[in-house]
Amino acid sequence: MPAAKYNGERASFAEWCATPLGRYVLDWEHGQFDNAVEDVFGFRALQVGMPEQDFLRHNRIPYRFTLALEAGAAVAADPLQLPVASQSLDLVALPHALF
């Protein structure tokens, strides 16, 4: 049985994020990411998924980009495949991902 592929559809999650509770959670999450990434240095940073949110906004790495199937991502690709060369990134942010 082949592995399931991420389909990029997140309409219900995006709608929930627009609710007062969703906005509260996103604001809290942004604060956590801001604290976690602000002192990470390097040359390339990647945010996987949620291109409509900038979880790397407080990071000083010069080249930051998003990878997702949703509109607005700098790299349109399946996050489950992660088409990035080994050891080519200094920081990877995975909002709402469990590994």
Image (cartoon, grey):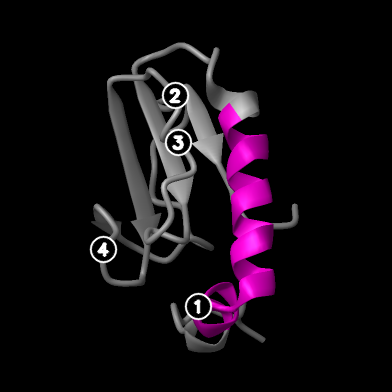
Q: Which residue is mark 4?
A: 72
Q: Quadrant of the N terminus?
A: bottom right
Q: Amino acid at mark 4?
A: Gly
Q: Residues within 10 Å of mark 3 (few under 14, many from 20)?
A: many
Q: Amino acid at mark 1?
A: Ala
Q: CA distance from mark 1 to mark 3?
A: 19 Å
Q: Residues within 10 Å of mark 2 (few under 14, many from 20)?
A: many
Q: Secondary structure at mark 2?
A: loop
- Boundaries of the magenta span: 13-34
Q: CA distance from mark 2 to mark 1?
A: 24 Å
Please say whether residue 24 is one of the residues in the magenta stretch: yes
Q: Is residue 90 left or right of residue 66?
A: right
Disc ID at residue 59: 2
Q: Residues within 10 Å of mark 1 (few under 14, many from 20)?
A: few
Disc ID at residue 14: 1
Q: Secondary structure at mark 1?
A: helix
